[in-house]
Image (cartoon, rainbow, N blue to C red):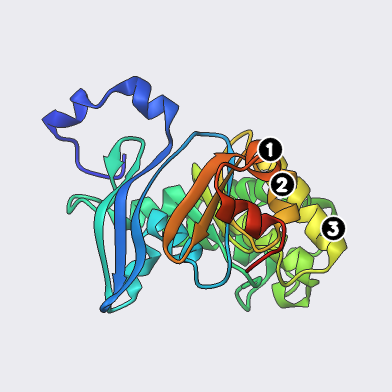
């Protein structure tokens, strides 16, 4: 749980919690006077990969960052509506934001390893939670590195600086760092845009494997990537959610002309 228990929590339909991991209800976002998100509603099922596509500045990254309250750091940010995780409104005053961000991991556009060893990077989130058990830390570091397919490449050199790794390895390390604290949701903001095609393919394979255990939401400018790895795709344009459907349907038989124009390259 990410909030204090209340009597009314028991009336939340448990079947709804199982059906939808994330829900947005009529969400509007302002930065000062600028309306960045214009009344978006969306349901995201657990253990699925959901892709957000759309031209630059359309609101997809802003919307993604609502799910772990990263926009809170922007002074002019203001929101109306609800963002629910497992039935809890994460903008409720009783929400523990630290616990929320443990449950909702984030992987950024450019790899951002800390200037520490490989081991210390992966163990970082656990250590700041006060975990000191060396055996437990070692097990979580090893398991997380195995999950991202990095263990065999670094197991003999865990004290090596993370900054000495290649770009693709650094991004997999950052994903391992996210997994180490055992989230249930992973947000990814263009996680392969700074990588070469071989590293991109490895990350895409990893993302596809991770959905067995995690709910994944990814922002991407690469429509081929969205079509390859996602179960559902949402097309954003100028702060509006234009269309949201199963990926195969959205890319082969979109309902909206704007969607068809974007995916066929007529604008954007």
The percent position of residue 190, horizontal first and vertical second, equals 63, 64
Q: Please give the residue where the numbered disc 1 appears in the rendered image.
A: 248
User: Nearest the camera: 12 or 171?
Assistant: 12
Say above or below: 136 vs 237: above
For marks 3 and 1, give the one nearer the viewer: 1
The percent position of residue 188, horizontal first and vertical second, equals 58, 58
User: Nearest the camera: 116 or 194?
Assistant: 194
Cα gap from disc 3 to disc 1, whole angstroms: 35 Å
The percent position of residue 230, horizontal first and vertical second, equals 65, 43
Q: Residue furthest front?
A: 257
Query: In which image quadrant can residue 49 be found?
Result: top right
Q: Does label 2 or label 1 sit earlier along the sequence?
A: 2
Cα gap from disc 2 to disc 1, whole angstroms: 7 Å
Q: Is residue 23 left or right of residue 251?
A: left
Q: Residue at x 31, y 39 (%)?
A: 1
Disc 2 to disc 1: CB gap under 8 Å = yes
Q: Please give the residue where the numbered disc 2 appears in the rendered image.
A: 227
Q: Which mark is on residue 256?
A: none
Label 2 packing within 10 angstroms: few (<14), some (14-19), many (20+):
some
Q: Please give the residue where the numbered disc 3 appears in the rendered image.
A: 153
């Amino acid at each position: 749980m990410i909030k204090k228990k209340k009597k009314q929590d028991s009336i939340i339909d448990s079947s709804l919690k199982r059906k939808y991991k994330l829900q947005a209800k009529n969400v509007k976002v302002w930065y000062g006077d600028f309306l960045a998100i214009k009344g978006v509603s969306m349901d995201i099922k657990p253990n699925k990969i959901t892709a957000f596509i759309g031209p630059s500045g359309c609101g997809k990254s802003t919307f993604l960052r609502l799910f772990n309250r990263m926009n809170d750091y922007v002074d002019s940010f203001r929101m109306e509506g609800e963002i629910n995780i497992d039935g809890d409104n994460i903008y409720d005053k009783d929400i523990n934001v630290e616990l929320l961000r443990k449950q909702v991991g984030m992987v950024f556009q450019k790899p951002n390893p800390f200037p520490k060893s490989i081991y210390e990077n992966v163990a970082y989130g656990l250590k700041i939670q006060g975990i000191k058990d060396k055996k437990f830390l070692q097990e979580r570091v090893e398991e997380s590195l195995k999950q991202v397919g990095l263990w065999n490449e670094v197991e003999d050199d865990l004290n090596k600086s993370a900054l000495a790794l290649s770009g693709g390895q650094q991004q997999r390390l950052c994903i391992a760092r996210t997994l180490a604290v055992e989230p249930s949701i992973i947000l990814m903001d263009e996680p392969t845009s700074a990588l070469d095609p071989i590293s991109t393919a490895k990350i895409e394979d990893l993302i596809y494997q991770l959905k067995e255990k995690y709910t994944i939401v990814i922002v991407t400018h690469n429509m081929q990537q969205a079509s390859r790895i996602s179960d559902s795709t949402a097309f954003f344009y100028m702060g509006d959610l234009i269309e949201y459907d199963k990926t195969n349907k959205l890319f082969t038989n979109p309902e909206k002309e704007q969607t068809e124009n974007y995916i066929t390259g007529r604008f954007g």
